[in-house]
Image (spheres, rainbow, N blue to C red):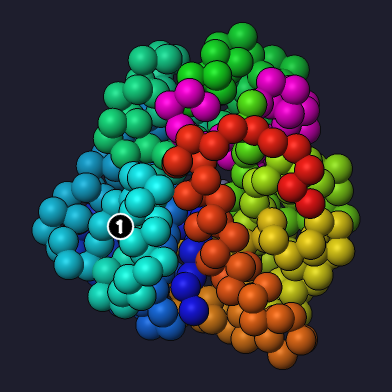
Amino acid sequence: MHFFDAHCDILSVINSPSQLVSNNRHWDIGRALSNGPFLQVFSLFAPDSDPRSRKKKMEDQLEMARLAESLFPERLKMVRTDGDIDNWINDRDTRQVRYIIEAEGAEILGDSLDELDRLYDKGLRILTLSWNFDNSVCDSAAGVNTHNGLSAFGRKVIERAEKLGIIIDLSHSSDKTFSDVEEIAKKPFIASHSNSRTVCGHRRNLADDQVISVAKRGGVIGINLYPRFLADTGNAGITEIIKHVEYISSLVGTGHIGFGFDFDGIDYTPDGIRGVEDTVKVAEALLRLNYSEEAVKGIAGLNFAGFMRRILSGCEYSENNI
Ligand SMILES: [Zn+2]
């Protein structure tokens, strides 16, 4: 089975490229490939309160990923095009992790639209508009409603990103930011690492109409493993992960669900999940519940892969994908 994970913060917690190959954290190349071909979205992430220092650290992480690829080309390869996704699906390679670069917060732009073009050239393909702070582009779910949604600059960022082929990711966005993006987006968007707010009432999770909105446009929602986003008690195991899959698929079917497990961005994991090597356990649990093999392959990897391939090939917006 092919596995695609839409969110991992490993680059933010290591300090040398070789640690990507093997470490004691949640995610490394060796363990990622232990169950099949793996495509990982690497997040550029820093929790610093100063936006300039966040930008600097995110840039450093991008350079570390590129350096790791040059040092270990047989273990790591960046995905930039739809053809790269096709190759990953067809190769069945279990020596080399393919990766996509995502920035977790528009702070990486340093308030400059031109930075989007430069970062696209360096490999950026997904822009998560915010982390836990409001920024110059929009308000965060954990913010203080600085702009009441998207700023004027944020609107320009969405337009430019869509033209370039950078995917907009609304995980962490405030509800008003979400609805502002719904109004102006011409292409599908994703929620790379967010669960259902009906199942677990955390503000980081998606309301039902947001789940439907992502799916209707053809986007994908990545299930997050943080126990506080899985269950109101903060105690969770594989059963609670499955509850979110069950509920979201009851709204929009299984074709818009993927994994965005948030490894190395969460301070503890659900019972039964040590790290990326246990990704397969979620797929196995779904198969035991009589989800079809096709549906499980979609959730485990092909839904996100198909979505990325469509966007990277320059598809236009179309409604009614559910
Ligand atoms: Zn996050």
- In front here: 107 or 284? 284
Q: What x and y, as percent, mark residue 193?
A: 61, 53
- At horizontal 41% and vertical 66% (from top left) the residue drawn is 89
Does the magenta run of residues contain 194? no
- At horizontal 11% and vertical 58% (from top left) the residue drawn is 71
| Residue beneath disc 1 | 14
- At horizontal 37% and vertical 37% (from top left) the residue drawn is 124
Q: What x and y, as percent, mark residue 113?
A: 42, 15
Figure quadrant of residue 317 = top right
Residue type (three-letter) at the residue carrying disc 1: Ile
- In front here: 9 or 296? 296
- Horizontal side of 24 relative to 143 (left or right) equals left
- Horizontal side of 197 relative to 157 (left or right) equals right
- At horizontal 19% and vertical 55% (from top left) the residue drawn is 69
- In front here: 302 or 144? 302
Residue numbers of the magenta segment? 162-185
- In the image, farthest residue toward the bottom: 288
- In the image, farthest residue toward the top: 152
Does the magenta run of residues contain 182? yes
Q: What x and y, as percent, mark residue 243?
A: 80, 71
Residue 210 visible? The answer is yes
Q: Is residue 258 above or below residue 44?
A: below
Q: Secondary structure at mark 1?
A: loop
- Horizontal side of 41 relative to 249 (left or right) equals left
Figure quadrant of residue 286 = bottom right
Q: Is residue 296 above or below residue 171?
A: below
